[in-house]
Image (tube, rainbow, N blue to C red):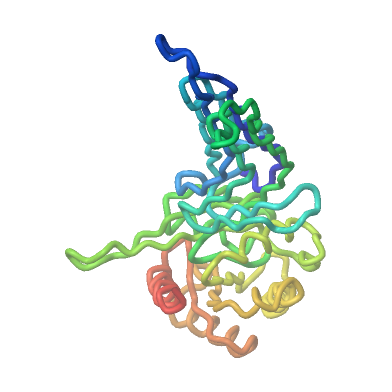
Amino acid sequence: MFIDEASIQVSSGKGGDGCVSFRREKFVPKGGPDGGDGGHGGSVILEAYSSEDTLQTFAGQHHWHAPNGQPGGPAQRSGKQGNDVIVRVPPGTLIYEEPDGPLLADLAAPGDRYVAAEGGAGGYGNARFKTATNQAPRQVRPGGGAVSRDLRLELKLVADVGLMGLPNAGKSSFLAAVSQARPKVADYPFTTLEPALGIVSLPTALGADPRRLVVADIPGLIEGASDGVGLGHAFLRHIERTRLLLHLVDFQPADGSDPVANHRTVVRELQRHSSLLASKPQIVAATKMDLLPNDEDRRLAAAMLGDAIGVPVTAVSAASGYGVRELLEVCWTQVAKNG
């Protein structure tokens, strides 16, 4: 199950109190103060891990608590510190103050961290307060209080290439053809109800670094998606993270719709949602070209569609593999250029 939103509560540990104590040693009748400091309370830290790809963990666990620090002891013994609690989240996690607060952190890359609830500082024992005029202090500083916060987590997938298009444009078929991902593929709209990631490996020369693309299959877009219609809100959120948009257009839709108008619908929704999103580099590909009998007809159909929408169009077929490898090479070049 893919979960991309969650609400959690985090609580840090309280700092341990300082200790009031005086030395009691044999043959030392007037021992000085020796109360130790309390330990710091544990913090709750959110950290992005590459092994995580969903917020599903938080569907079953909503509360995260760090342990308290222990109080100080005699003989200037410091109290044990509370261990920090590391909460693992996927890269691309946004952290907001619940319910409608501002953005607190954007953990975009593996290793990014955010201290969501800082542990209380340890208190001071009475040994800290000894002075020339106060030889037997009895004052201490108590440990710092715990912090509790309600947070909202939102995931935006981090991918090199985001597949976009109307429902049933062939996005899931394309992802399944180029990677080991197995999204649901069927001949009806909205087969993709949640985003899916696939790793595409491209051929490399002997001894060269591997070439890989992370491709995201996003739920299909319909008119009004920028206003939350259909699954558009999920589509638009996740596609914001991608470096390159691959717009798949069914050149001969089964419902008889116009592929040119379909292309414009998707572009219009991108523009309405965000000018930054609409300005991302895009590649347009006409899908399901195996329905045409020969390569010449496929190239002609792609050229006619490109003339109508005003941008070059590549002809591909996930079913037969026609044009797929060439398209991936173009994607690799664009991602490297915009890297």
Q: Residue at x 62, y 66 (%)?
A: 240
The quarter of the picture where residue 144 lies is top right
Q: Depth check: 126 or 335 in front?
A: 126
For this view, does 189 lie left or right of residue 211? right
Q: Residue at x 33, y 64 (%)?
A: 211
The answer to whether residue 91 is seen in the rendering is yes
Disc tally is 0
Q: Residue at x 29, y 65 (%)?
A: 203
Vertical arrangement, residue 311 with respect to residue 290, above or below: below
Q: Quadrant of the N terminus?
A: top right
Task: Give coordinates of residue 233: x percent, y percent.
Answer: 74, 59
Q: Depth check: 83 or 40 in front?
A: 40
Task: Give coordinates of residue 125: x percent, y percent.
Answer: 57, 29
Q: Residue furthest left?
A: 206
Task: Give coordinates of residue 129: x percent, y percent.
Answer: 58, 35
Vertical arrangement, residue 207 with respect to residue 331, above or below: above
Q: Depth check: 177 or 251 in front?
A: 177
Q: Depth check: 169 or 75 in front?
A: 75
Vertical arrangement, residue 224 with respect to residue 87, above or below: below
For this view, does 244 lie left or right of residue 254? left
Vertical arrangement, residue 220 with respect to residue 60, above or below: below
Q: Quadrant of the C terminus?
A: bottom left
The quarter of the picture where residue 284 lies is bottom right
The quarter of the picture where residue 140 lies is top right
The answer to whether residue 64 is seen in the rendering is no
Q: Residue at x 58, y 24 (%)?
A: 19
For this view, does 254 lie left or right of residue 20? right
